[in-house]
Image (cartoon, rainbow, N blue to C red):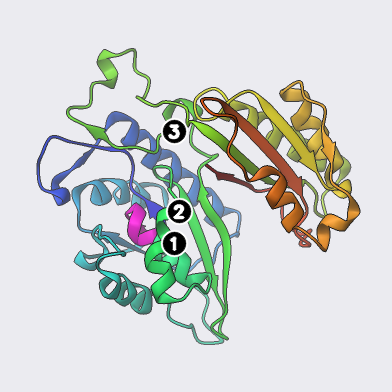
């Protein structure tokens, strides 16, 4: 599921909002990245594209067939933006239509280009959140433009959330999360996107690097995640950071701590049985009027895939 690229609006109807210059760049980067996933065999080769009929979604979706060959393309008004809190049954209808259990012999990829709210509602439902809670819980998340949220559905009907709002494939200079009110003036303001760092405390949750690769490959993973998280301090989060990790994630934590000139803190081994202790320690507001970052590095018990980064604000 892809959120559309950044758009701008000047009072026109919602479905007429068009992409900004950065929105087009984001969509292009994401289309190219998805093409690479198919080429590397990381997605089932049988594929189709389904997009919202809103202009910003159409313009985002149009980049995909340029890079991904043999892609069936469909569109649906039902995927237009909605408010799942006030219209939960419409959002639930979309979820039920799209998250259908495949046949045991079937394997395919459906790329959906839609909008922040409806994607987050479907994510909540795929994660097993009941309808009445999903209609509220989606508001706790926010997706970056042209980011990828992936859910795998097995032939048994089980759903596995693989990624939420992944956007590391988009250049830092083009990353945005808010749409533009008024005309797109970025070209007249030095070319950079309009964005401001979040206030308060930001929690960055990092899955430790590892897997079945060689030592050199794991070292590259560690360096990549450290560089990526550090880059976020340039435009999204505070550079004042605390780094904490479990004992098995110390190598990744050390690289991150080095980027922020911090001394990594080590969770006791009991944190695996009592994770609430970590929540109570760090998921708190900073001092009034201040802004900081807490980076937590830990394992999740699955060692066959590389690191992942999640951000909470």
For the point 32% across and 36% down, the residue is 24
Q: In front: 184, or 50?
A: 184
Rendered position, 177 above or below 124: above
Viewer can see residue 143: yes
Q: Earlier in the sequence, mark 3 or mark 2?
A: 2
Which residue matches tag 2? 140
Instruction: Say whether marks 1 and 2 touch (CB < 8 Å).
Output: yes
For the point 46% across and 64% down, the residue is 123
Which residue matches tag 3? 175
For the residues labelled 1 and 2, the Cα–Cα distance comes to 6 Å
Residue 32: mark in rendering: none
Give the quarter of the image for residue 53.
bottom left
For the point 83% across and 48% down, the residue is 246
How crowded pointer 2 is (Cα within 10 Å; few <14, some 14-19, many 20+) is rated as: few
Q: Nearer the viewer, mark 3 or mark 1?
A: 1
> In the picture provided, is 252 more to the left or to the right than 90?
right
Quadrant location, the N terminus: bottom left
Residue 154 belongs to magenta span? no
How crowded pointer 1 is (Cα within 10 Å; few <14, some 14-19, many 20+) is rated as: some
Q: In front: 147, or 139?
A: 139
Q: Nearer the viewer, mark 3 or mark 2?
A: 2
Residue 59 rendering spot, x and y as whole percentages:
25, 46
Viewer can see residue 228: no
Q: In front: 270, or 281?
A: 281
For the residues labelled 3 and 2, the Cα–Cα distance comes to 20 Å
Residue 137: mark in rendering: 1
Secondary element type, mark 3: loop
Q: In front: 303, or 294?
A: 294
What range is drawn magenta here? 112-119
């Amino acid at each position: 599921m892809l959120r559309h690229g950044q758009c701008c609006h000047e009072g026109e109807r919602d479905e007429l909002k068009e992409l900004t210059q950065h929105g087009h760049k984001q969509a292009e980067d994401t289309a190219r990245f998805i093409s690479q996933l198919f080429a590397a065999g990381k997605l089932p080769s049988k594929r189709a594209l389904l997009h919202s009929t809103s202009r910003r979604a159409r313009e985002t979706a149009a980049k995909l067939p340029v890079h991904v060959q043999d892609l069936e393309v469909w569109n649906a008004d039902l995927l237009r933006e909605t408010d799942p809190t006030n219209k939960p049954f419409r959002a639930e209808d979309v979820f039920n239509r799209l998250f259908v259990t495949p046949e045991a012999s079937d394997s395919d990829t459906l790329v959906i280009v839609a909008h922040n709210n409806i994607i987050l509602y479907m994510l909540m439902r795929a994660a097993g959140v009941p309808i009445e809670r999903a209609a509220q819980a989606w508001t706790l998340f926010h997706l970056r433009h042209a980011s990828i949220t992936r859910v795998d559905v097995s032939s048994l009907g089980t759903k596995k959330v693989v990624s939420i709002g992944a956007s590391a494939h988009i250049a830092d200079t083009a990353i945005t999360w808010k749409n533009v009110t008024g005309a797109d003036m970025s070209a007249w303001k030095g070319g950079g996107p309009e964005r401001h760092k979040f206030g308060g405390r930001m929690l960055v949750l990092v899955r430790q690097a590892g897997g079945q690769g060689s030592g050199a490959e794991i070292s590259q993973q560690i360096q990549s995640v450290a560089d990526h998280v550090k880059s976020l301090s340039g435009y999204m989060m505070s550079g004042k950071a605390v780094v904490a990790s479990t004992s098995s994630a110390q190598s990744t934590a050390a690289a991150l701590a080095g980027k922020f000139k911090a001394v990594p803190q080590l969770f006791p081994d009991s944190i695996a049985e009592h994770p609430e202790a970590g929540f109570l320690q760090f998921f708190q507001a900073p001092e009034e009027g201040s802004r900081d970052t807490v980076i937590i590095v830990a394992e999740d018990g699955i060692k066959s895939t590389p690191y992942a980064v999640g951000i909470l604000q």
